[in-house]
Image (spheres, rainbow, N blue to C red):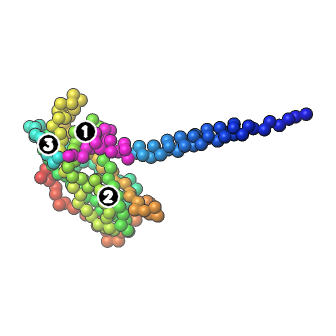
Amino acid sequence: MNRQTVPHPQKKNTNRIVAGVCIAFFGGMIGMAYAAVPLYAMFCQATGYGGTVKRATQQYADRVLDRDITIRFDANTASVPWQFQPVARSVTIKIGETAQAHYSATNKFVRATTARATFNVQPELAGSYFNKVECFCFTDTTLKPGETLDMTVVFYVDPDIVNAPELKDLKTITLSYTMFPVEKNEKTKPVASTVPAEGTSNKVSHTERSLGG
């Protein structure tokens, strides 16, 4: 005659506790993963890790070296219906000199769109020496249909870059921006179409062709 084994109440409670601990652990891991994204971004901006440019705490370097370095500018878009480009492709400055560059953005969509710029430099090791004083990338940008905006970045290269063995002979740094769409609320969907707005102009602002001044 077969006899059924009835689970002991204490064993059932233990199983429930173990299951609850496992669920809490995995939930915590997922939460930490999401939290790690903005924390990692803050870390990169503070240290220049991974080619991320540092946000300067002062407007000028403590000295200017009698040595030139060329800054090249790059622009990209990711699912944003904008014409986005640097006004000039490069500028040559003194290491430690505070300089100004301009980018132009035109909304080619039939409604207003908002975007945010991410940025880095190449080579990556130069990120900790490339300091931004002012930048359009510090805030989101909204453009009306057909609107063109001149966007400024003010920066300098820390003179301490010449003390880094890997960078002491560096002649060129590339500053690159990529525009990403920003959702204003949960109901807003990313822009999927790039239909030009009526009356849109392809003209790029030429407010400042010279980037050094």
87 or 153, which lies in front?
Answer: 153
> Quadrant of residue 81 in the image?
bottom left
Q: Which residue is mark 3?
A: 61
Q: Real-space Cα distance between discs 2 and 3?
A: 27 Å
Residue that appears at 8% across and 37% down: 66
First along the sequence among labels 3 and 1: 3
Q: CA distance from mark 3 to mark 1?
A: 14 Å
| Residue in front for this viewpoint, 154 or 108 | 154
- Find residue 18 and report its horizontal and vertical position in percent: 61, 38
- Residue under label 1: 128
Residue shown at 54% from the left, 43% from the top: 24
**Residue 58 colored magenta?**
no
On the question of residue 16 being in view, the answer is yes
What's under tag 2, amino acid-wise? Asp
What crowding class fits label 1: few (fewer than 14 Cα within 10 Å), some (14-19), or many (20 or more)?
Answer: many
Residue at the image point whose x is 14% and y is 53% from the top: 210
Give the residue pinned by disc 2.
140
The range drawn in magenta is 38-57
Dot 3 amino acid type: Ala
Q: How many marks?
A: 3
Label pair 3/1, CB-CB below 8 angstroms? no
Residue type at numbered disc 1: Ser
Asked if residue 52 is among those painted magenta in the image, a careful observer would answer: yes
**Looking at the picture, does residue 98 appear above or below residue 164?**
below
Residue 207: mark: none
The N terminus lies in quadrant: top right
